[in-house]
Image: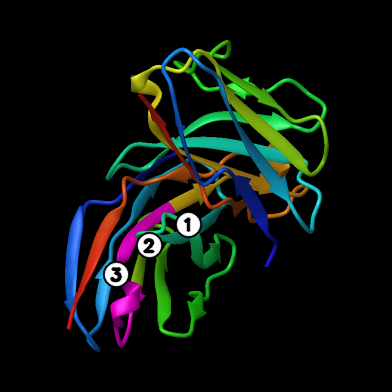
Amino acid sequence: AQTVTQSQPEMSVQEAETVTLSCTYDTSESDYYLFWYKQPPSRQMILVIRQEAYKQQNATENRFSVNFQKAAKSFSLKISDSQLGDAAMYFCAYRSPPNSGNTPLVFGKGTRLSVIA
Amino acid sequence: GAVVSQHPSWVICKSGTSVKIECRSLDFQATTMFWYRQFPKQSLMLMATSNEGSKATYEQGVEKDKFLINHASLTLSTLTVTSAHPEDSSFYICSAREGSYTEAFFGQGTRLTVV
């Protein structure tokens, strides 16, 4: 079974600075998807960024980018120019490829990010 | 993006009563629904997966007779917590996916408090 590990329970960053959240995963599959979700105090799950394992290029979405290291099974999230609104719980998630059926997301335990003004 | 509406956002019920939580996909066909439970400051724990028109598949340790899941249409799934007890108090989140589409979309969650 696949597992996702987030080794940083809590992180903090100064406003306008850059922070990197770590995520590692374990799988025997060669094709899969990786996600970062943000859960603010409202507890609504918000997709931040997505990476397909077959793509070598790292995904980027505005201030958010990932460092995807397939061989190392590492998928870190970099938040640039941090804003107060970035304060939230961040979850790394794994999904098996669609041809493996309607598989659910496998979540890490999360990293709580605080942004200091 | 696609919208999933979950209702109610919060509910308080007395111990021994049943509570129904609805999850609706507003602009796509939710062929698969996932139900999660989340305790404070913890991650999402998958409770069950349901495909439209089929019985739900429950994760190990989840009581299927206590957490009844119905997915009778492509836009609606319900989770009924039967004979609720204080230990069932939690945050419940649904997620819906259309076909083999990569992404699943989340409802806003329901905070259940059993008193």
Q: Label 2's element?
A: loop
Q: Label 3's element?
A: loop
Q: Which mark is residue A44?
A: 1
Quadrant of the drawing holding the C terminus of chain B = top left
Magenta segment: does it hold A81? Answer: yes
Residue annotated with mark 3: A87
Quadrant of the drawing holding the N terminus of chain B = bottom right
Which label's residue is closer to the chain start, 3 or 2?
2
Q: Position of residue A85 (x, y in %)?
A: 34, 76
Chain letter of mark 3 equals A
Which one is in front, A60 or B23?
B23
Which label's residue is closer to the chain start, 1 or 3?
1
Which range is magenta? A78-92
Q: Do marks 1 and 3 share a chain?
A: yes
Task: Look at label 1 and name its amino acid.
Answer: Gln
Q: Is residue A80 above or below residue B94?
A: below
Q: Position of residue A68 (x, y in %)?
A: 42, 66
Q: Mark 3 near mark 2, Cβ–Cβ under 8 Å?
A: yes
Q: Mark 2 near mark 1, Cβ–Cβ under 8 Å?
A: yes
- Decide: few, some or many residues near mark 3? Use Cα within 10 Å; few <14, some 14-19, many ≥20: many
| Cα distance in 3D space between marks 2 and 1 | 7 Å
